[in-house]
């Protein structure tokens, strides 16, 4: 197969290849501008520079890192460029450079997160000019205030005339590989460059009461990193496109989200019907959970010595149970107490059954292992309501 692909490449018309690459280059319109930080602060205040709410929640530099960035500006050290996208209304959106711009705004006392003005940064951990430690922006001599305002940074701007799909792929690459961002956070921040409909849909469903109850045992950090939204995405991705899954979960989820969000040729997704399936799935699981008296631990792991699940969320239990339930969803009546009892028994048996547990744990992300988890509960639920 590799040799055949190589031969095909050799037979490709070089002029055709050059034309194809050039056409994509011509579809991107960029501009480079040097902005002073004071200009950026004014644009932010006047809402001419937007830091999307999804981005604001990703501002994670500790105070020491923020302070050292301010110190770098005062020392006139070079800083990397930022990347902006120009909207149709000529407003700029910050896509890459959040930590730097937010640090400056925080020092100036202008940074808002979730609409709330943050307390101004007090410099700490400056390691070159240690005399700066303990100072706020208001404490600086006027000459240093002016110097800081006039410090500039290069901005690479993707113009509104650019092809939206190329804009998306450019900023997707800028925002992948960062150590501080989880995969779902990157998806949320970048996918809207294609279309925000599916992204918003996932965000809404992650707040739905039955779903939120069932996954409430995920950790605080997981919630901050949008793991609840990733679980919604996993549900639809595996349910609707599981045949394409191989081993890399992150890329598979991103590919599905891109396909549904493609502005030119989107993968079919019936929002009304899909929401109904989602709602019924977690309505049933909420009722089963309440019947078992296990609160929000229906996706919890177990200790073989104790009869109840622990408050330790397992994505493997989640996948097996929610996807296995799809095979009988139309036949389940959440108000049928006898059905609910049998479904609950099936859930609890699975949590202690090696036939299921042997397909859970580290290194069990292959398609075969996923299919085995789903088949176990699919068969168990079919038997429960037959």
Image: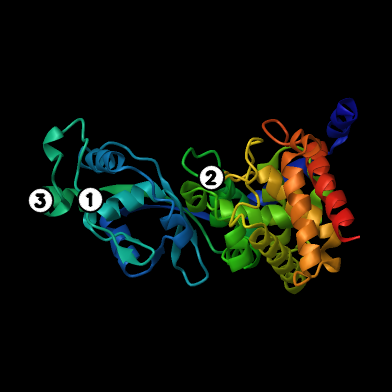
Q: Earlier in the sequence, mark 2 or mark 3?
A: 3
Q: Earlier in the sequence, mark 1 or mark 3?
A: 1
Residue 193 visible in image = no
- Residue 182 is labelled as 2
Mark 3 = which residue? 139
Secondary-structure class at tag 3: helix
Q: Is residue 116 above or below residue 55?
A: below
- Asked if the residues shown at circle 2 and circle 1 are in contact, with their CB atoms under 8 angstroms apart, the answer is no
**Residue depicted at 81% across the width and 36% down the height:** 355
Q: Earlier in the sequence, mark 2 or mark 1?
A: 1
- Residue 121 is labelled as 1
- Residue 376 lies, in percent from the top left, at 83, 45
The quadrant holding residue 349 is: top right
Mark 2 and mark 1: Cα distance apart in space? 26 Å
- Residue 23 lies, in percent from the top left, at 70, 51
Quick one: label 2, few (<14), some, or many (20+) residues within 10 Å? some
**Residue at the farthest top position:** 3
């Amino acid at each position: 197969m590799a040799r055949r692909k190589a031969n095909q490449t050799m037979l490709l018309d070089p002029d055709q290849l050059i034309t194809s690459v050039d056409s994509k280059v011509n579809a991107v319109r960029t501009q480079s501008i040097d902005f002073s930080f004071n200009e950026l602060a004014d644009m932010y205040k006047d809402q001419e520079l937007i830091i999307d709410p999804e981005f604001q929640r990703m501002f994670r530099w500790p105070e020491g890192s923020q302070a050292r960035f301010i110190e770098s500006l005062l020392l006139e050290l070079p800083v990397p460029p930022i990347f902006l996208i120009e909207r149709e209304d000529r407003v700029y959106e910050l896509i890459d450079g959040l930590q730097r711009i937010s640090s400056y705004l925080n020092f100036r006392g202008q940074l808002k997160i979730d609409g709330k003005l943050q307390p101004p940064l007090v410099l700490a951990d400056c390691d070159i000019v240690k005399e700066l430690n303990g100072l706020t922006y208001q404490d600086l001599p006027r000459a240093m205030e002016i110097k800081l305002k006039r410090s500039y940074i290069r901005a690479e701007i993707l113009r509104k005339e650019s092809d939206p799909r190329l804009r998306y792929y450019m900023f997707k690459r800028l925002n992948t590989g960062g150590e501080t961002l989880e995969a779902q956070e990157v998806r949320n921040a970048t996918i809207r460059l294609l279309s925000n409909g599916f992204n918003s849909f996932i965000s809404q469903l992650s707040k739905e009461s039955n779903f939120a109850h069932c996954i409430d045992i995920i950790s605080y950090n997981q919630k901050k990193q949008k793991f609840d939204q990733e679980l919604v995405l996993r549900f639809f991705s595996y349910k609707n496109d599981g045949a394409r899954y191989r081993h890399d979960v992150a890329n598979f989820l991103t590919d599905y989200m891109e396909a549904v969000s493609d502005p030119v040729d989107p993968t079919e997704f019936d929002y009304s019907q899909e929401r109904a399936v989602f709602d019924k799935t977690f309505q049933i699981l909420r009722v089963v959970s309440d019947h078992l008296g296990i609160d929000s631990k229906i996706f919890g792991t177990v200790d073989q010595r104790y009869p109840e699940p622990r408050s330790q969320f397992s994505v493997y239990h989640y996948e097996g149970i929610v996807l296995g339930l799809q095979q009988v969803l139309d036949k389940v009546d959440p108000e049928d107490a006898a059905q609910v009892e049998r479904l609950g028994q099936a859930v609890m048996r699975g949590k202690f059954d090696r036939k299921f547990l042997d397909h859970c744990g580290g290194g069990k992300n292959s398609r075969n292992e996923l299919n085995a988890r789903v088949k176990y509960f699919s068969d168990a639920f079919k038997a429960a309501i037959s």
